[in-house]
Amino acid sequence: MASFGGVDTRLYRGGVGPQVVRSAAGPLARLLLAPGEAATARADDPAVVVMGTAPGEIAVGPAAARALLERWRALPMAVLGDSVHEVHTPTYGYAVASIEMPPPGGGSSEKMLGLIIALPRGDAWAVVGIHYLPP
């Protein structure tokens, strides 16, 4: 059985945001940081959903999810510290991580919490949901 585990705290832009118990990063964390690759790995299911940090950044269904993830393909995302928590079971998997996105040309990084949920498909994962949450 898997769970999100205990919750710690981390500072985000002067406020406090959630951070999950850490574990090793795996294939789902890598997909979370690479929206273009997640677009290819997304499930062909009408219930697949992608949500971003801005109003209107929501896509439901395989075509819309792929299009939104492709828009984010070139965004430079990295895990903030060692904040990854990834779980695999025989029927589903998920990863949660604190993410930072450095802006082009320097300056302060945008920080967010990312969640990816996927179903095992042989040796690969079919993404059914991704959510990037603002702090």
Image (spheres, rainbow, N blue to C red):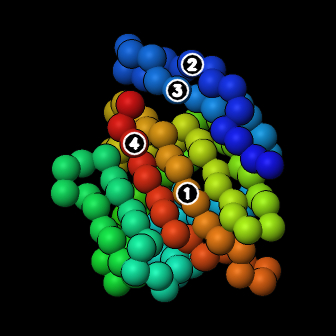
Q: Which residue is mark 2?
A: 9
The first of marks 4 and 1 along the sequence is 1
Identify the residue position indicated by label 4 in the image: 133
Residue at 48 percent of width and 85 percent of height: 44
Q: Amino acid at mark 2?
A: Thr
Furthest toward the left, the residue is 56
Judged from the image, the secondary structure of the residue bearing numbered disc 2 is: strand
- Type of amino acid at the residue the image marks with label 1: Ile
Residue depicted at x 35% and y 57%:
51
Q: Secondary structure at mark 4?
A: strand
Dot 1 lies on which element? strand
Name the residue rendered at 57%, 18% in the picture. 9
Q: Are marks 3 and 2 in contact (CB under 8 Å)?
A: yes
Circle 4 residues within 10 Å: few <14, some 14–19, many ≥20: some
Image quadrant where residue 48 sits: bottom left
Query: Residue 127 placed where, x, y %?
Result: 56, 71
**For marks 2 and 1 on the same chain, the one whose residue lies earlier in the sequence:** 2
Identify the residue under disc 1: 116
Using the rendered image of the protein, determine whether residue 71 is visible from the camera's viewpoint.
Answer: no
Question: Label 3, on which residue?
Answer: 18
Tell me the amino acid under the disc marked 3: Pro
Quick one: label 2, few (<14), some, or many (20+) residues within 10 Å? few
Precedes in sequence: disc 3 or disc 2: 2
Q: Quadrant of the C terminus?
A: top left
CA gap between label 2 and label 1 equals 20 Å
Relative horizontal placement of residue 114, taking residue 65 as reference (left or right): right
x and y percent of residue 15 in the render? 39, 16
